[in-house]
Amino acid sequence: MCARASSAGRHRRTLVIGAGAGAFAALSLADAGARVTLVDKASGLLTGASGRNGRRLHLGEHYSADIVSSQDETALNTGRLCFLGALQMARKFPFLSSRDAVWWQFLPPDSMTSVAAYDEHLAGLRVFHRFLARIDDSVDALFGEAAARHARLPESVLRAHVAPDAAVAGYSSRESVIDLARLRRVVTARLKQSDNPADIRMNTYVTRIDRVGDEYQVWMRARHGRTTRENFDLVVNATWHDIPRLASMVAPDSGSRDTVRLKLFVTARMPPKLAAAPSFYFHRGVFGNHTNAGNGLAIVTSEAISNFAFARADRIPRSWRTLLHEGLYGAAGIDALSRLADEPNNAAGTTGCTRARDALEIALRNAGQGAPARAVAVAARHALAQEVVSDYAELVPEFKAAAATGLNFSTVVTVGRADLPDPDSPVHIRSFCVKEVAPGFYNLNPGKLTLVQLAGDFLAAIALDRTMHDNPFDEVIHGLIQANWLRDGEVLINEWSEHHRHQPEHCHDE
């Protein structure tokens, strides 16, 4: 982005807390001229939820509960917003796009979406794709032509790969598999080596924030170091489950109450027949999918098992924090899994606590009486991972021959109460949430890796009082977001849009 910021926007001291989605916001802010400090209590970028996921660059196919007319070219819904996010990511990081990346999308009998409604949803995505391609031919260059998307799969494919009665229809789609290691390296390098490099501080924890006049005083404690206090003009809070804690320091009545779901991502070695096949996605109230990550490995997500419980974002159980930050290792991990097994399961349609208890029983049995905690933890990881693979094999029988090789805990944060089986739940109607809870203090919760760069660009435009675009295509994207951002909780963007509608056009760098 090279659009010129206002004189007030340039060189503003900006603190970004959280190096997942926050790293992409830091890129956008630094590109716009802000003096960016990026902090995270982890040891590297994209190591939390942004680095533990199904590695999909979503093009919007599976968000079929959020419907707009397929004939309306400019209306935004979750699927189209994902497509915009994927475009923005691919334009910033071209190695993410692949016209050859194929996914097979399956519609099971228990899907919340009928075949007719899903066909309408896909038609709307193609209409939107063609609309954007008329503005910029890079759209087709990155993701292929709209006409090549969403071909119906023949019955022979369903019979060959899907359990009987597990799918009533199948479609071929294109979604790139994200190389997270490379993305992490590139983002880190750009933040450090740009003309306006960010000050990156890992292993740093924000303990206190006070608003003093037009500035924010922030206390930060480095691991194994002392606490320091610094002043900033702007603060971006992109810390997923820590968003309410930090926001409440400057806006006690900010009212942030989000849903956090604890998930599992299991790495499995696939049988040779599946190693050359596309990735699979099943559209269910409780989802199931696997990403073909290459080299014979799959990343399996089966949320019927992995959503252990629901909790408010400011009341994450201690067991979750242990498993997220330390993993299922040693005595601490076993203790966390034991507490998890005993926690009330208050989320409809999930069986996580039962699975945790089953995994513990199997682990204790396999490790043997009196086995050290490390051995029990190894057995528990294997048991829990294999349960996920076995559950997924009920949809894809070939996975009965797959062997689990790794396990990662992660989270998904959703604004509001997110119940997976409810088609009207916020979990099925996504948006990147950019909210100014106090002057110059922004909460940022994109909710999906696909949306992080788009959210970062838009946040920089808001925070630095500048135009988002430096070319006609960005101008269209910006206008679409402004015109369609009408949901509760994002009043800021509507107010900002109305304010700028009457402002003189921003100039651009030559």
Image (cartoon, rainbow, N blue to C red):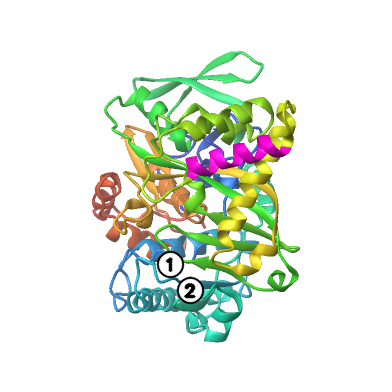
Q: Is residue 363 found inside the magenta-colored segment of the image? A: yes
Of 57 and 155, the residue lying toward us: 155
Mark-to-mark CA distance, 2 and 1? 8 Å
Q: Please indicate, yes or no, whether residue 238 appears anywhere in the rendered image.
A: no
Q: Quadrant of residue 384?
A: top right
Q: Is residue 187 found inside the magenta-colored segment of the image? A: no
Q: Residue at x 55, y 55 (%)?
A: 301
**Res. 178 mark:** none
**CB under 8 Å between discs 2 and 1:** yes
Residue labelled with disc 2: 136
Q: Residues within 10 Å of mark 1 (few under 14, many from 20)?
A: few
> Which segment did they paint magenta?
352-366
Q: Residues within 10 Å of mark 2 (few under 14, many from 20)?
A: some
In the rendered structure, the answer to whether residue 210 lies left or right of residue 154 reads left
Q: Position of residue 315 (x, y in %)?
A: 40, 29
Of 154 and 171, the residue lying toward us: 154
Q: Position of residue 42 (x, y in %)?
A: 61, 32
Q: Which kind of residue does numbered mark 2 sit on?
A: Asp
Q: How many marks?
A: 2
Q: Residue at x 61, y 56 (%)?
A: 389
Magenta span main SS: helix
Question: Disc 2 vs disc 1: which is toward the camera?
Answer: 2
Q: Quadrant of residue 382?
A: top right
> Element under label 1?
helix
> Element under label 2?
loop
Q: Which kind of residue does numbered mark 1 sit on?
A: Pro
Residue labelled with disc 1: 472
Q: Is residue 406 above or below residue 168?
A: above
In the rendered structure, the answer to whether residue 378 lies left or right of residue 395 reads right
